[in-house]
Image (tube, helix red, strand yellow):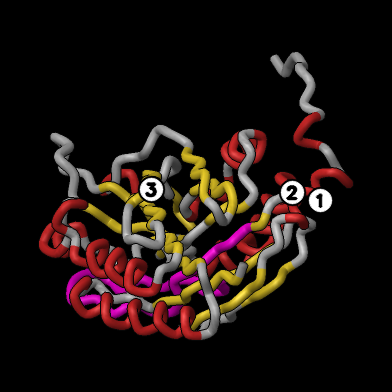
Amino acid sequence: MRAGLLQLNVSDDPAANLPETRKLLDRAVGEGAGFVLTPEVTNCVSASRTRQREVLQPEAEDRTLAGLREAAALHGIWLLIGSLALQTDDPDGRFANRSFLIDPSGGIVARYDKIHMFDVEVSETETYRESAGFRPGAEAVLAETPIGRIGMTVCYDIRFPQLYRRLAQAGAEILTIPAAFSPVTGAAHWEPLLRARAIECGAYVLAPAQTGTHAASRGRARNTHGHAMAVSPWGEVLADAGTDTGITLVDLNLQAVARARARVPSLAHDRPFGGPG
């Protein structure tokens, strides 16, 4: 199976972003991809809660979701929409950061709301409080599909290996980690964390990404790390997109998952232990 990872540089205007995303999706399909993956917040990258309230929509009304479902059906492909920022009916007004798995008929077969919120002070000038605008999810999601068992996660989840171990022990063969990673933490940690999750789980890791400086009509412009990556179940980097927008293609063979887990069967070696404290 050939997977196509999209690397995007979306603005805070969802209507302008969708045509560019579809253009890259079409290119990936034209080069043989039967499974296309987009990054975190495919519809809108914005650091302004005011701007988000203006342009974000509930799931049922989101034009990016509708447009990408249409594209999946048109091409007859599997599609991971890495995540969309969506309005919810939460009393506190917080948004959802929701990943979607779309089948070749355009149907939604799985949804995953990002569990771990990026509340981090990277430097004196770079601070994130994702939980102020987004409500965390509470359920891990494993999707059974003809192309493999897919464990769905998003970005900051990568720092919580217990989530991935649970997904792998439940049968996940492909772990998706769409991201809009900070350039500072990305340069230091992105590749090692992706490789670690692949090695620990004996699974493919597919990580489409946002990249560059994102145009903003309100508030500060965000910057993201890029380097969409695919990692093998043995921990080898199969592809690294660098920092340009575009598509990255990788061929997957799920027999590699079985081989990696047979060589190092650590998923079956958990033992109870006590301490500390």
Which of the marked residues, 2 or 1, is nearer the chain's N terminus?
A: 2
Which of the marked residues, 3 or 2, is nearer the chain's N terminus?
A: 3
**Which residue corresponds to mark 3?**
109
Q: In x, y percent, where is residue 180?
A: 44, 64
Residue 260's disc number: 1
Count of numbered marks: 3
Q: In x, y percent, where is residue 122?
A: 49, 58
Circle 2 crowding by C-alpha within 10 Å: few under 14, some 14–19, many from 20: many
Which of the marked residues, 3 or 1, is nearer the chain's N terminus?
A: 3
> Magenta region: which residues?
205-228
185 left or right, relative to 110: right
Q: Quadrant of the C terminus?
A: top right
The amino acid type, in three-letter code, at marker 2 is Gly
The amino acid type, in three-letter code, at marker 1 is Ala
Distance between mark 3 and mark 2 Cα atoms = 24 Å
Distance between mark 3 and mark 1 Cα atoms = 28 Å
Q: Are marks 2 and 1 in contact (CB under 8 Å)?
A: yes
* Residue 52 seen in this snapshot: no
**Which residue corresponds to mark 2?**
202
Residue at the spot 72% in from the left edge and 18% down from the top edge? 276
